[in-house]
Amino acid sequence: MLAAIVAPAQAPTVFHGNVQSHIYHRQSCRFFDCRACTSVCKSREEAEKSGFRPCKVCKP
């Protein structure tokens, strides 16, 4: 009997936006958990539509 190979579920991609600088960061960025990073976006498009620009360190 053949067993089906199931790919592990991918962790949802989340970006944090800094409400003071208007920069968003990926989860691996050292600035992801800063005090001002209180805006949570589910995609780059959502972050940019909300007025954030990509971080120049993590380049999301």
Image (cartoon, grey):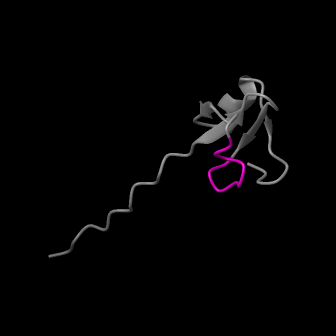
Region of the chain picked out in magenta, as a range: 26-34
Q: Position of residue 44 (x, y in %)?
A: 69, 38
Q: Is residue 3 above or below residue 28?
A: below
Q: Is residue 12 magenta?
A: no
57 displayed left or right of 30? right
Q: Residue furthest left?
A: 1
49 displayed left or right of 41? right
Q: Residue furthest right?
A: 56
Q: Residue at x 26, y 67 (%)?
A: 4
* Of residues 3 and 27, the one drawn nearer to the viewer in this rendering: 27
Q: Position of residue 45 (x, y in %)?
A: 69, 32
Q: Residue at x 85, y 49 (%)?
A: 56
Q: How many marks?
A: 0
Q: Quadrant of the N terminus?
A: bottom left
Q: Is residue 54 above or below residue 49?
A: below
Main SS class of the magenta portion in the image: loop
Q: Residue at x 65, y 38 (%)?
A: 16
Q: Position of residue 18 (x, y in %)?
A: 73, 34
Q: Is residue 9 above or below residue 13?
A: below
Q: Quadrant of residue 30?
A: bottom right
Q: Residue at x 40, y 55 (%)?
A: 9
Q: Position of residue 10 (x, y in %)?
A: 46, 54
Q: Is residue 29 magenta?
A: yes
Q: Is residue 12 above or below residue 17?
A: below
Q: Residue furthest front?
A: 35
